[in-house]
């Protein structure tokens, strides 16, 4: 969705289970009300929850602020390889 060549350190700060601030985001791969998947310098970060919203996205600094009912944060390197397939890679499995 957005891609940046930033070199900022990755940091994840959750406030309760309602808000999170993430830095070091180089790309947002997908998002909807059930979750957000983004690429960081530590790997692909999957955030699951309900009523998820992107409050702020700064493509220059790699900062992402989100809100919703946050259920889990998972780093997944296998998603990174699948994400590079593109449209044709997904169609012709």
Image (cartoon, helix red, strand yellow):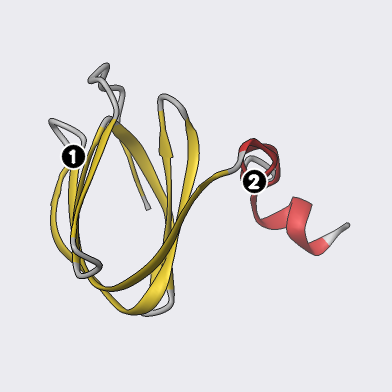
Q: Earlier in the sequence, mark 2 or mark 1?
A: 1
Considering only vertical position in the picture, is 7 above or below 54?
above
User: Where residue 52 sits: x, y (%)?
Assistant: 30, 74
User: Where residue 55 sits: x, y (%)?
Assistant: 12, 64
* Other-residue count near label 2 (Cα within 10 Å), few / some / many at <14 / 14–19 / ≥20: some
User: For numbered disc 2, what is the local secondary structure?
Assistant: helix
Considering only vertical position in the picture, is 87 above or below 82?
below
Q: Nearer the viewer, mark 2 or mark 1?
A: 2
The quarter of the rendered structure image containing the C terminus is bottom right
The outermost residue toward the top is: 7
Instruction: Identify the residue position indicated by label 2 in the image.
Output: 79
> Does 85 sit left or right of 20 as displayed?
right
User: Where residue 80 sits: x, y (%)?
Assistant: 61, 39
> Does 77 sit left or right of 45 as displayed?
right
The outermost residue toward the front is: 16
Residue beneath the point at 25% across and 67% down: 17
Q: Quadrant of residue 56?
A: bottom left
* Other-residue count near label 1 (Cα within 10 Å), few / some / many at <14 / 14–19 / ≥20: some
Residue beneath the point at 77% across and 51% down: 89
The outermost residue toward the right is: 93
> Does 89 sit left or right of 47 as displayed?
right
Q: How far separated are the C-alphas under marks 2 and 1?
A: 21 Å
Instruction: Indicate which disc residue 59 carries.
Output: 1
User: For numbered disc 1, what is the local secondary structure?
Assistant: loop
User: Where residue 58 sits: x, y (%)?
Assistant: 13, 43
Q: Quadrant of residue 90?
A: bottom right
């Amino acid at each position: 969705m957005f891609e940046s060549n930033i070199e900022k350190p990755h940091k994840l700060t959750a406030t309760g289970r309602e808000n999170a601030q993430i830095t070091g985001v180089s790309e947002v791969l997908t998002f909807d009300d059930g979750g957000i998947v983004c690429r960081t310098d530590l790997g692909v970060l999957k955030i699951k929850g309900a009523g998820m919203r992107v409050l702020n996205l700064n493509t220059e600094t790699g900062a992402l602020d989100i809100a919703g009912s946050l259920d889990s944060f998972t780093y997944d390197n296998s998603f990174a390889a699948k994400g590079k397939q593109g449209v044709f890679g997904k169609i012709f499995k």
